[in-house]
Amino acid sequence: MYSVTVTHGTRKHLISFGECPSPTTEELAMEIEKVTQVPLSQQKLIFKGKQLEIGNIELRSLKVAPGSKVMMLGRQLNSESEAIKTEIMKVKSEGEKISSKISDLEDQLSGIHNGHLPSEQLQGEALARIHKQCVGTVEQIMKLLEQLDSLQTSDQSMRQLKRNTVLSTQKLLDRCDKMMEKL
């Protein structure tokens, strides 16, 4: 059985992987999250003075043998941070849906510009419909940015998550602007 001892602060946790012959650093981090309530995104795993990259990397390949000791640095999110993270993740999810919608509109616009509609009247109607959908999409994006703007936190990791989400949401706005220029 593959197991490692994880120290977090003054506490030690024995993490066992049952019959798994070679668990990954990501699997270790997920197990640590279950035991310590420290989110994977907040964890830093240290083994023999070096930080382990969390991903699909087998512990054995990093010389973390069964019975080894790994130190974990990180802290639990407080309830305020957890609530903010939930709101940010909702905005990210909405942003992904909007991104898909923008891609569809971009494809439609490309088809029109490539002459897939035979008459100018049909092209005009299609362009007007795309313009209307684009304006609605911009309004949705602005609402998402307002939601993000209303979230206040002193938690550094939540501020970084919010900042990254704002940047990706602004990129959606840029895509809409470029499409509107082509209309």
Image (cartoon, helix red, strand yellow):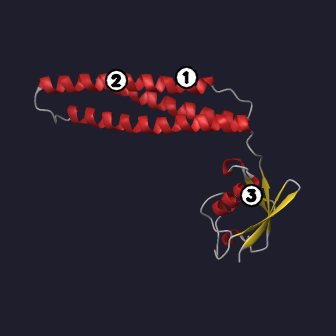
Above or below, comparing residue 36 to residue 108 in the picture: below
Residue 108 coordinates in the image, percent (x, y): 26, 35
Mark number displayed over residue 50: none
SS state under label 2: helix
SS state under label 3: helix
The quadrant in which residue 105 appears is top left
Residue 58 coordinates in the image, percent (x, y): 64, 68
> Image quadrant for the N terminus?
bottom right
- Judged left or right of residue 43, residue 112 is left
Give amino acid for label 2.
Met
The residue that appears at 74% across and 53% down in the rendered structure is 44
Lower position in the chain sequence, tag 3 or tag 1: 3
Near mark 3 (Cα within 10 A), the count class, few <14, some 14-19 or many ≥20, is few
Q: To which residue does mark 3 refer?
A: 35
Q: In front of the other: label 1 or label 2?
A: 1
Q: Which sits in the foreground, 100 or 50?
A: 100
Q: To which residue does mark 2 refer?
A: 180
Residue 53 in sight from this viewpoint? no
Give amino acid for label 3.
Val
Above or below, comparing residue 83 to residue 22 in the picture: above
Lower position in the chain sequence, tag 3 or tag 2: 3
The quadrant in which residue 88 appears is top right
Q: Are marks 1 and 2 in contact (CB under 8 Å)?
A: no
Instruction: Residue at the far left: name it.
Output: 119
Lower position in the chain sequence, tag 1 or tag 2: 1
Mark number displayed over residue 146: 1
